[in-house]
Image: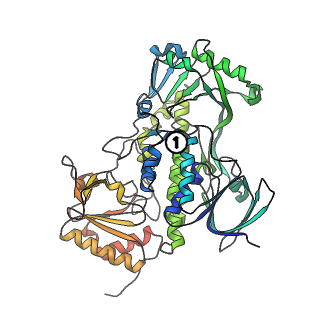
Amino acid sequence: MVDVRVPVLVIGAGPVGLATSLFLGRHGVPTMVLEKRDGTSLLPRAPGLQARTMELFRAAGLGKDIRALEKGDTHAYFEGGIIQVETFAGIDDAVLLERPSLDGPQVSPERVMGCGQDRYEKVLAEKARENGADVRFRTKLLDFVQDEDGVTATAEVLDTGEKLTIRADYLVGADGAGSQVRRTLGVEREGRGTVFHALSIYFQAPELEVLLKGRKFILCYASAGGTLMGLSRLHGINPWLAAPIYHPDQGEKPEDFTDERCVGIVQRAAGKDIDVEIVAKIPWEGAQLVAERFRTGRVFLAGDAAHVHPPAGGFGANTGIHDAHNLAWKLAGVISGWAGDQLLDTYHAERHRVGSAMASQALVRNRIRHGYATDEDKKAMVDDIIITLGYRYRSTGIAAPMDTPTLTQELALTGEPGTRAPHYWLDRDGERISTVDLFWDHYVLLAPAGEAGQAWADAAVKAAAELGVPLKTYLVGTDLVPAEQDRSWTDVWGIPEGGAALVRPDAFIAWRGATDEGEPKDVLGKVLAAAAGLEPVTTQG
């Protein structure tokens, strides 16, 4: 007997699972979320929210809710970069290791933001429920099986022992690095494996403010004691986070790190016997592993269940939230009936490449920061802004060569198919918006005002109607007015004379071209069908 029927069952109520549910809900798709924990996170983990992540929250209608969680101006921490000292008392002698580019007024309408997972998870859970999600904590997945028509899962309510049988069209495993969903599927992982073991020590230490003299940073590494210990407070408020390395191969175990020992570790790194109060201790493993496939039939992997990597760069939760968005709009399209199953295959094609690239870049950063990088490692490293905003998708849904690298050495958001649509300020009925604000639940045909642009718009409307695909058209110069004077929008977007661009609901460009490619309706019929995972409609005349 089936107790619950739902379009999508999500396993895991961390940032990735909750974001998946929220995004699906904003597309009108109800979900159920199962989480064995008691509730949302109580610790300020994953504290750096990238500009692209903030764009996704902005598009989903909760950008202001997330931004309101910021304590002070956390951007100053990011501007401080990554530094190294012998002890925190020697902050005046700090050496700058990295100062990554993370955002910019001509790159994104959003800025990076520091906020602990303990705060933004609560908002994600609240907003997911507001949008139709059934979020159940202390409910554990026991098993699942899938068939051609759906997935049947069994779960246990931990407080009562009650068993639930849930029937879903699709299942999303966002249940972390030890993913039960991935293990049940038998999906193997490839990569470097374990890189190191660390202990996150959350602590209070008022005197640390005095020692650091108000210096802001993403991370401050202290080398006292012969091993690097990272210190961070990107979330803008107490507690501090210290992350010393420990060595299981030398017999060290997490339980060896008593509160007294942890106080000593912090004091040694501080260079002074300051008062330290331990709040929490969490052991974890720095590893680099990527699942061989992100889709198995009607089951998908996202976040750490799909890819794990060292925290260097802060790509983990952000990359997982980007997974969630890429998957959610595609599932919504298939469930709503306007997209084909082939669109779901593009989730693996696009996000596996990105997840692999992120994992490689995180490992390179870890090697560089710990002093054992090769020249090849240093050459391979690209700036953070390319990793977070400049990655490129390649799949059957993108009209671009499949062999283009996922990451490039220079940021190039110039309207190339497979990249995030360039940010450009526009005026719409007296409201200043970014081009990034135009995309959520429709494909968009964007063209310059004029005869050629109108021909593209008319052709797009006809093609979309025949395919049954949601689409909006905008002519820049009439429907939308450029609000910038120093840059032409067609130059920023790389739109050729008489050309246009087709953008997906996730703000990634599916196609860009001009009239020399053929009749607009024929061209758009093919590219729109491919972008939606459909076969082109064949018509006469």
SS type, badge 1: loop
At label 1, counting other C-alpha atoms closer than 10 Å, the crowd grade (few under 14, some 14-19, many 20 or more) is many
Residue, far right: 161
Q: In the image, what residue occupies the spot 45% across and 21% down?
A: 214
Q: Who is closer to the viewer here, 512 or 143?
A: 143
Percent x, y of residue 407: 44, 46
Percent x, y of residue 361: 51, 40
Percent x, y of residue 326: 50, 58
Snapshot quadrant of residue 538: bottom left
Q: Quadrant of the C terminus?
A: bottom left
Residue, far bottom: 540
Q: Which residue is mark 1?
A: 315
Q: Is residue 204 left or right of residue 446?
A: right
Amino acid type at mark 1: Phe
Percent x, y of residue 376: 49, 34
Q: In the image, what residue occupies the spot 33% across and 75% down?
A: 461
Q: Who is closer to the viewer here, 16 or 196?
A: 16
Could one spot residue 46 in this view of the protein?
A: yes
Q: Is residue 1 left or right of residue 8?
A: right
Q: Is residue 93 above or below residue 535?
A: above
Q: Quadrant of the N terminus?
A: bottom right
Q: Who is closer to the viewer here, 109 or 502?
A: 109
